[in-house]
Image (cartoon, helix red, strand yellow):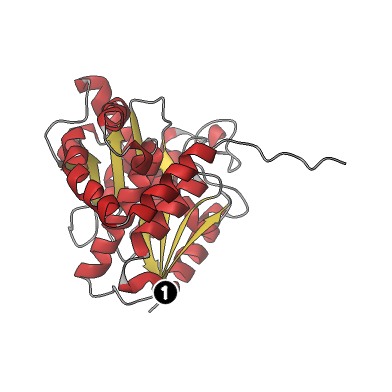
Amino acid sequence: MALRIYFDGSGKEEHPVLTVGGYMASDKKCEAIEDAWDEIVGDGLFHLADFGTKSCTLGSGEWDVSQRVAFLKRLSGIVNQSLSPPLSISVETEQYRKFVAGSGNPHVYGPAYSGCAQLCFALAEYVLDINGWQNEEVAYTFELGDRQHEISKSFYEYVRPKPIVNKRSIHFLPKETVLLQPSDLIAGKIQEVLMRAYSDLGTVEIMDGHICIDEFKKYYSYDGTSLAVLDRPNGKRPLCFVVSKSKWEESEPAVTKIFELHPNLLAKRLKHVKNQGKRRRKPSV
């Protein structure tokens, strides 16, 4: 059984919270998801940030509230066809930056999006493991241009030492890719919940460690669209977590140990950081 995992981001580094989220499905399930999505969305592009505005190619800016809610719930029903509950990692960006600033390995973590993406790999691999799918071929997909080089390096560093290395691949596809759009919905609805919580509480780090999104149920939308995305028909909890600063700090000894055992990885990382952003000179003519 070949599997695909799609992730997308919501929020920006300057926002109080940032989320990377998505889902996992078999090739067969992906075909069904794509067909069902196309049937509802048609030739338009679903992007939650544009939904209900004049920028939405679906025309949702002209719809009333009940039409928008019904539409999102139909799309959420498609999301629930995936093999996994929604998968996501979110961080409070200021706390994440404080952690990186005090880390002995800042070159490992990168900005908040990259840090979340790295933990999404680990979360997805955990799901594969508990379901007995570790030896299946798995293709990860992110949106084209989203910290692509950093995420690729993190991905290969994660899988290269493992027996699964030849069974994993990573891809970057444009926003218009149909199977990325459910990830946009998942990440976007989680981001909305956490932004409401942050606005009310002044933080989303309500406890140490990792906090499941259902701890924020009071901030789910009144219209039922948050619940439609995050609740599974079988009642399983979403695998969607806010990772606190203390949890990141717990990872430090293990990361340090890896670079002590594999100094070549550290050299590669530092070279990447040194060269990042440099432009290649054009050859003289």
- Rendering coords of residue 240 (x, y %): 25, 48
Q: Few, some or many C-alpha atoms within 10 Å of disc 1 (few <14, some 14-19, many ≥20)?
A: few
The structure residue drawn at horizontal position 31% and vertical position 57%, both measured from the top left corner, is: 262
Judging depth in this view, the residue of 230 and 160 nearest the camera is 160
Q: Picture coordinates of residue 129 (x, y %)?
A: 23, 69
**Which residue is located at x 51 percent, y 48 percent?**
149
For this rendering, which residue is in front, 184 or 107?
107
Q: Residue visible at 14% across and 30% down?
A: 206
Question: 236 or 257, which lies in front?
Answer: 257
| Tag 1 secondary structure | helix
User: Label 1, on which residue?
Assistant: 166
- Is 133 displayed left or right of 68 in the figure? left
Front-lying residue, 98 or 52: 98
Check the image and name the residue furthest to the bottom: 1
Residue 182 seen in render: no
Identify whether 166 is placed above or below 255. Answer: below
Q: Quadrant of residue 278?
A: top right
- Name the spot of residue 145 as percent of width and height, x first: 55, 45
Q: Position of residue 34 (x, y in %)?
A: 50, 63
The amino acid at mark 1 is Asn
* Residue 115 in sight: yes
Which residue is rendered at x = 56% and y = 33% of the image? Answer: 62
Give the farthest residue toward the left. 207
Compared to residue 190, the image places residue 1 above or below, namely below
210 relative to 187 in the view: left or right: left
Quadrant of the image occupied by residue 110 = top left
